[in-house]
Amino acid sequence: MNDRTRPDLLAPRAEKPGAPADARTATGYIGLSVPRAGARRLLQGRGTYTDDLKLPRLAHVVFFRSPYAHARIRKLDLTTAARQPGVIAAFDGRAIAEYCTPWVGVLAHLKGIKSPPQHAVAIERACWQGEAVAAIVAESRAQGEDALAHVEAEWEELPVVTDMEDALSNRSVIHPELGDNICFKRDFVTEGFEDAFAKADLVVEETYSFGRHTGVTLEGRAILADYNAGEHSLTVYQATQAPHMMQDIFSRHLNIPEANVRVICKDVGGSYGIKVHVYPDEMATAAISVMLRRPVKFLADRLESFLTDIHAREHKAKVRLACTKDGKIIGFDLDDLTGIGPYSVYPRTSGIEGNQVVNLTGGPYAHKNYRARLNVVFTNKNVTCQYRAVGHPIAVAITEGIVDLAAQKLGIDPAEFRRRNLIADDAYPYTFPSGLKFEQLSHHQCLDKLLALMDYQGLRAEQKRLREKKIYRGIGLAAMIEVTNPSPAFYGVGGARISAQDGATVRLEPTGMVTCLVSVTEQGQGTEGIFQQICATAVGVSIDKVRVITGDTGTTPYGGGTWASRGAGIGGEALLQAGKALRANILELAAAALSIDKNALDVSTDAVCDKATGETKMPLAEVGRIGYFRPDTLPLKFQAELTVTRHYTPREYGFTFTNGIQASYVELDTDTGFVKLLKHWVVEDCGTVINPMLVDEQIRGGVVQGIGGAMLEECLYSPEGQLLNGSLADYLVPMSGDTPDIEIAHVCTPTRQSELGAKGVGEAGTAGAPGAVMNAINDALAPLGARVNVQPFTPERILRALGKV
Amino acid sequence: MKAAPFAYAKPGSLREAFALLERHGDRAKLLAGGQSLIAALNMRLATPSILVDLTAIPGIDGIQLRGDHLAIGALVRHREIERSELVAKHAPLLSQAAPHIAHVAIRNAGTIGGSLAMADPAAEWPACCVALEAHIVAASPKGERRIPATKFFKSLFTTALAPREIITAVEVPVAGANTRSAFLELVRRRGDYAIVGLAAHTQLERGALTRLRLVYLGVGDAPVSAAGAMEKLEGKRATPEAIAAAQAALEQDLSPAADLTHSAATKLHLARVLLGRALAALVT
Ligand SMILES: Cc1cc2nc3c(=O)[nH]c(=O)nc-3n(C[C@H](O)[C@H](O)[C@H](O)COP(=O)(O)OP(=O)(O)OC[C@H]3O[C@@H](n4cnc5c(N)ncnc54)[C@H](O)[C@@H]3O)c2cc1C
């Protein structure tokens, strides 16, 4: 048969949309591992990322970036570059500044924080290697990159500050107008602190260092800005976690009325906090769209990502712990230093990470005395800001490291030492010495569960047996608390125009389907999937009847978006309330139509039914039909309200704290300094678990990112401020083959602040993993009299600790 | 990360390829599996004006046993070597080394010819070829020459190839009944280029190491033969004393440069550790 005559080849038949995978009726989906809605679309290659968008007259912008960490621009000549094939325009910082005002990354509640104004494209001076100093707009990205080679620049190198302690000494001040290199400083001490430390039986001290690293997203930063001069409006397609925040920022810095700015967030390939900040090159892209009155796209390629995506976690922290000889912790003393690059990042500031370290150190333990000092200093490296688990990996590692050291000094088993000191499960509400308030935590339940899950005693016995054969294995524990569901206390009180509330709109469609629009965004983590579950449960429909729309300031309610483990707890609660309100309105309509008391009705199985007998009274499709097409059949005064919006903000507590504990089991090769991660365990209390599969995978992914920081990832800079490993060949991220199995269990203490009871979980894995791994390595090293405290734990560092090199 | 503009040609014979090289001179670059070259193009580390794709040229692929040697065509993919029964039988060192090269997807595309021409000092094939005393067959319009691997790798990314020569094959002496080999390397993540690696090869005569070859990767700007260590061990059994003496000799044999995360001292230490482990593997 001739192929041409085969109809299946001429017109390949599309797979017909089949029966829904899960047509279970709505007895409720909370707590079920429902496969998430968007996964099939993404796996079929039908995702739409910002880079997939192509608009007519689309131009591409590339940036000429400073090759120096600190240098004055003596000459910048763009004329030859502007004449290259395909080039539409070339701009320096001054040209762009006419359309985009500079910003300053400070917040009022971080008292004394300072940072100089930052421009979209640097003017006169570049302060880190990779800072954009010119923009070239071309018909294609490749032509833009070709033209970059024709930018003529002359530089005068300025003194470079890369080392945090050097910065703190103010030997050379990066921004002379600020007076010194200190962006932010905090000193905190509880009453009677000195006295308590003086009386302690034992005070242990250690200094921990953390390598600067970054959150490597699969999809790079991406933006397509489309200015429409006809209505003075700007539509921005952006891979962002916070579309409303960006709407406000584009509006204010480009001087376009807020209502004329629409930010649309298509599929996003991972964010981890990287995509919640204002990036100069993205602001420049939007400004250029206004300047050229045409759509302009910018994508950070992988090399640009390493130079300009926010870095995080470069800390050096000296910690002291005081305790009694019978192993009761009396207090913690912290002196933390962190280097943030030349600018505090807008609008969340680069002071928050250090501030979190101060807030959280010692967090799981019942002690009364705390002193903390924090110095946040400017350096000539890429900027740092909030990356998944902000400050927690530092605070947990230093707390758990020093706790283990104290236990070791006292000869107490680390699990037992924790049991003696973790805040009791019946001690809540509890106020921590740093001022944080905990509603209800479950440290002891989690510890017990973990020890059983990992067979702690069995592992200790195995460890002992193997040590006799010169096999060095180590067990490390790390208890933690975690900030989730933040109230305005995080940003709003400091003057940031960042919403702490979220909103959800639910609409019954005429066929009985439900559409919900939520202000929380989907970054690939499955948020839309849990929203389907919550909405289906709240309204009383089967899950295949629910469609979720997020990530569009033009359609969704106003809200914060995705960050600080807030999507499920805040957005989810808004959606639950909206869904319940819609359910009530559906019942009103059905009751009116059927002339039955609404209290005798309920919604279940996609239909209004008799509450007592379950008998179907009216399918939702009928409710929709009547509500939209035949309201004339309803009582005269009745108005159908089949669209409902609700909002939610946590009010009573600043943050909904969660807690958990992790354990790591490692084997050390004492000849090579290599560490094999054998196994990892997590017990986590995130309150109501909406989708166990998604929760567990969030934890696993988080643990892997934490392991990355502990073992592999570090942005290495030369003394001249050159990034030495700015590609995926040299910047090592963990890969699945080298990752241990991660076993997870839960304790569920729903928050009473919301009806849903969900706390956040997205950052928990990352928060606890580095501390657990560090403690496991040090446990393995202990019989050899060695210890490590500089992350990442490279073979070099371990061999040096062992005295082998 | 977009490559600078370039032209592309896919010659159907060596003769056509030579003609293209003749016409474009230094501006032409040969393309095999593309696993090193394409990344270099995208990062604009290389900006050739034309790529000459070798993959349609007949006669420079396949693995054949030819008398006392195994002939491996330049276009043979890393993965083919890994899975080849001929290689496992006659050149087991190559089978041992292959899984250490990158990941399956890359091994499916990358070629042995490309790897040898690339001459990355941390790559597996160059060290193995030196340890096996293989010959690299290079063709030019003037004809063919067989270059001993021991003379082929000059320095970082530099080989004995003349400007317009093309590698067509590598010839590896076949293993005998007493041949033993071991390939070991240390990487932070599976598939990364080696921090330190060691290709070891010997004829075991009644427990004694003879014609021992110890060739390191990742410790110099080309594969490094550990001459002193080889001398200390030649004709000896791998006793603790002999091993210790050989390990001590590495101090003279190797002068590794520090990399991003390992100091020179650490690399030397790791080289010693690998030597001990390789010898243990050779004699068991
Ligand atoms: C993520 C990643 C990890 C890697 N890890 C490793 C590793 O651990 N170990 C390792 O050894 N390699 C590694 N590689 C490199 C890989 O092995 C390459 O396949 C190899 O280096 C080059 O072979 P190729 O066929 O891909 O050559 P190409 O990339 O096509 O060419 C490389 C160079 O060789 C020249 N060339 C190619 N063929 C010939 C020929 N027949 N004659 C003359 N010149 C020729 C080209 O002109 C070019 O200069 C890795 C690559 C990647 C992308």
Image (cartoon, rainbow, N blue to C red):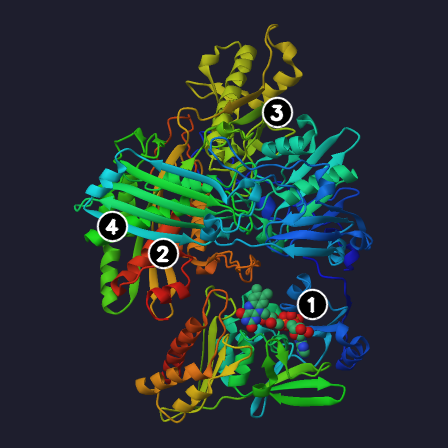
Pointer 3: what residue?
Answer: A509
Q: Quadrant of the C terminus of chain B?
A: bottom left
- Which residue type does callout 3 highlight? Glu
For discs 1 and 4, the disc positioned in front in the rendered view: 4
Q: Which of the two discs, 3 and 1, sits closer to the camera?
A: 1
**Discs 3/2, front:** 2
Report the front residue among A61 and B77.
A61
Q: Quadrant of the N terminus of chain B?
A: bottom right
Q: Say yes or no: labels 3 and 2 on the same chain.
A: yes
Q: Is mark 1 within 8 Å of ligand 1?
A: yes
Give residue A450's position: percent from left, percent from top. Answer: 30, 46
Whether the residue under disc 3 has CB within 8 Å of ligand 1:
no
- Classed neighbour count for the residue bearing mark 4: other residues with Cα under 10 Å, few (<14), some (14–19), many (≥20): many
Spatial CA span between label 2 and label 1: 41 Å
Q: Are marks 3 and 1 on the same chain?
A: no
Q: Residue type at mark 2?
A: Asn
Q: Residue at x 45, y 14 (%)?
A: A600
Res A49 seen here: no
Mark 2 element type? loop
Residue visible at 75% across and 75% down?
B26
- The answer to whether residue B230 shows anywhere in this view is yes
